[in-house]
Amino acid sequence: MTDFNLIEANDRIMVCLSGGKDSYAMLDLLLHLQRVAPIDFSLVAVNLDQKQPGFPQHVLPDYLDALGVEYRIVEEDTYSVVMDKVPEGKTTCGLCSRLRRGILYRVADELGATKIALGHHADDLLETLLLNMFHGGSIKTMPPKLHADNGNNVVIRPLAYCRETDLQAFSDIKGYPIIPCNLCGSQPNLQRQAMKQLLTTWEAEDPSRIASMLTSLGNVTPSHMLDKNLYDFDSNQRVSSTPLSTPLFAGNEFPLLRM
């Protein structure tokens, strides 16, 4: 929160709740932060009901009513759109994600939200990094704070420092009513799943490897890359028109990492 100034006084945070362990944990942590933080901010939970077959519509309203949290359930049949537009056997994630993002941006404006909180964690950041390197020809991932291209919305990822194993353990303790995704999460042979397995194998071989990779995300040396938009190799200096952010991780250890 403090490293990237994710939440400011009087913010209205739209917490995107999917029914998975990560978003449940994020909501819990933000509710705790709301109680102890020295600033005032409000939360509104939002779930996008994409009309996937068998989606248990009562689960999230019952859970949020019990918590006493303000919420909104948005019903949009993106499932049918994705099934109609994406050829059989092709990955649905790209189109599904774009449709979801547009809807969430619109809802954030309707609710007067100043920030949109997503539940991506540290493992998601690494998987995205590898996907972009292996399949996109670029070095980039999902930042903890992102100003959307539309100029109106700010996306924050409060779980950027959290490992998925810790979130799973927390979820098991809390006993969240998990809602499985029958669209993207159920597809076989997803490249993201391949990246996840690759990271799992690497961590089993050397537990410190993942911590080092995460640290590298905030320890970039432009002069030792090949991007002329970041570094002027003739004058031997950074390109001033490209602002460089504060390092994602200080020092040599990933914050709060438990080996």
Image: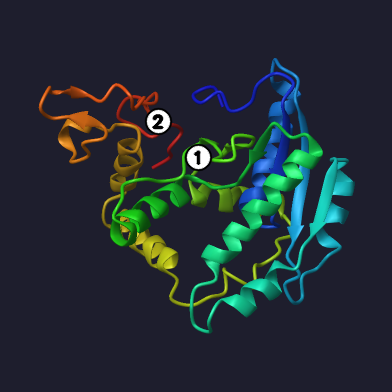
Let me know if residue 232 appears in the view: yes
Q: Which mark is residue 108?
A: none
Q: Which mark is residue 248?
A: 2
Check the image and name the residue furthest to the bottom. 88
Task: Using the rendered view, name the quadrant where residue 213 is placed.
Answer: top left
Looking at the image, which residue is at 30% across and 54% down? 133
Q: Secondary structure at mark 2?
A: loop
Q: Quadrant of the C terminus?
A: top left
86 up-or-down from 109: above or below: below
Q: Secondary structure at mark 1?
A: loop
| 80 to the left or right of 63 | left
Neighbour tally class for label 1: few under 14, some 14-19, many 20 plus, Cα within 10 Å: many
Dot 1 or dot 2, earlier in sequence? 1
| 18 to the left or right of 258 | right
Residue 243, given in percent of the width and then of the height, sits at 36, 24
In the rendered structure, which amino acid carries the disc numbered 1? Ala
Residue 251, given in percent of the width and then of the height, sits at 32, 25
Marks 1/2: CA–CA distance: 10 Å
Q: Quadrant of the N terminus?
A: top right
Q: Which residue carries the number 1 mark?
A: 160
Q: Are marks 1 and 2 in contact (CB under 8 Å)?
A: yes
Task: Using the rendered view, name the quadrant where residue 76 is placed.
Answer: bottom right
